[in-house]
Image (spheres, rainbow, N blue to C red):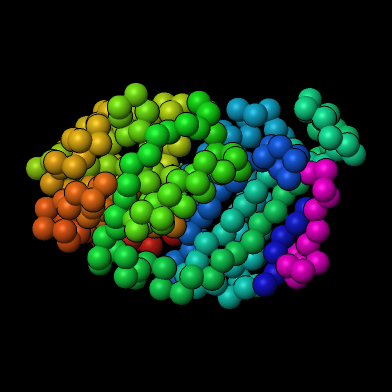
Amino acid sequence: RTVFLNGEYLPETEAKVSIFDRAFLMADGVYEVTSVLGGKLIDFDGHARRLQRSLDELQMPAPCSMDALLEIHRELVRLNGIEDGLVYLQVTRGAPGDRDFTWPDPETCPPTLVLFTQNKPGLADSPAAKAGIKVISIEDIRWHRRDIKTTQLLYPSMGKMMAKKAGADDAWMIEDGFVTEGTSNNAYIIKGNKIITRALSNDILHGITRAAVLRFAQEAQMEVEERNFTIDEAKEADEAFISSASMFVMPVVEIDGVTLGDGTPGTRALRLREIYLDESRKAAI
Ligand code: PLP
């Protein structure tokens, strides 16, 4: 696999980063994951805009222009022959010559830019979408700037491990009695014709897929209500689903062992998945 590191396309075995890189020592980095369908990027502009926002919030300089980033994405997809898969991008505050809590001067310590691809043939035909996924609920103990897409992913990893141990696929996190989001996705419930999902704030990541899904839902005459919901309300909902760049729209069929409906993916969630995939493929670049 060919990867990109600081201006160069390299075999993955030759891409090396300093042990003083602040992402390695302090999780001082931000990232994006963009999906590729039919060799094209899904919602690149949304991911580029959110990357810029994450960088701004952490006063981290952009490693290059967003146009240059698009070209790197495309070149890696081409070099690695990706039809369906993902492009992972990470920008870190670089590698000062020593460990220190204070941020280095960007003039003397440029950011580290890494991109690699993940080949996922048939990414959009996932068997999980036909069966639906099971989630458990766990407490949300993450920091309070979840709107910044940082590489501090230890608690989401723990959450996924807790889910796995419980025989589930993912965990929904709960704060002050309300669901915030999934470990790596936004969470939704459906009641009648109404899609309910938490409103945007610093409590959740502003999902790029979320923005598209809510737009398509409204265009399809579904009602959208952005508000908090509890896990008990979710267990009594008609349907539930998650969204993310790599899972698109994924139906949820079980929450904390409680089966939703007849235990198969709901018709509205499946319809939204279809619309999302159709429209995103059309707009892919
Ligand atoms: N919420 C969290 C915590 C995430 O990590 C992610 C994606 O990685 C999302 C939501 C979904 O965001 P997007 O649709 O932009 O992939």
Ligand number 1: quarter of image: top left
* The stretch drawn in magenta includes residue 254: no
Which of the 4 quarters of the picture holds residue 176? Answer: top left
In the displayed structure, would residue 38 be above or below residue 23?
below
Left or right relative to 121: residue 71: right
Q: How many marks?
A: 0
In the displayed structure, would residue 180 be above or below residue 124?
above
The one nearer the camera, 28 or 170, is: 170
Q: Residue at x 42, y 33 (%)?
A: 140
Residue 270 in the image: state x and y as whole percent. 22, 58
Residue 264 in the image: state x and y as whole percent. 17, 61
Left or right relative to 244: residue 106: right
Q: In what quadrant of the picture does the N terminus appear?
A: bottom right
The one nearer the camera, 198 or 2, is: 198
Which of the 4 quarters of the picture holds residue 253? Answer: bottom left
In the displayed structure, would residue 77 be above or below residue 57?
below
Q: Residue at x 46, y 74 (%)?
A: 121
Q: Residue at x 25, y 67 (%)?
A: 130
Left or right relative to 66: residue 219: left
Which of the 4 quarters of the picture holds residue 137? Answer: top left
The one nearer the camera, 157 or 243, is: 157
In the displayed structure, would residue 11 be above or below residue 226?
below
Q: Which residues are magenta?
A: 7-21
Residue 93 in the image: state x and y as whole percent. 74, 38
Asked if residue 49 shows in the view, the reply is no
Residue 90 in the image: state x and y as whole percent. 65, 48
Q: Residue at x 88, y 36 (%)?
A: 98
User: Which residue sits furthest front?
Assistant: 165
Asked if residue 238 shows in the view, the reply is yes
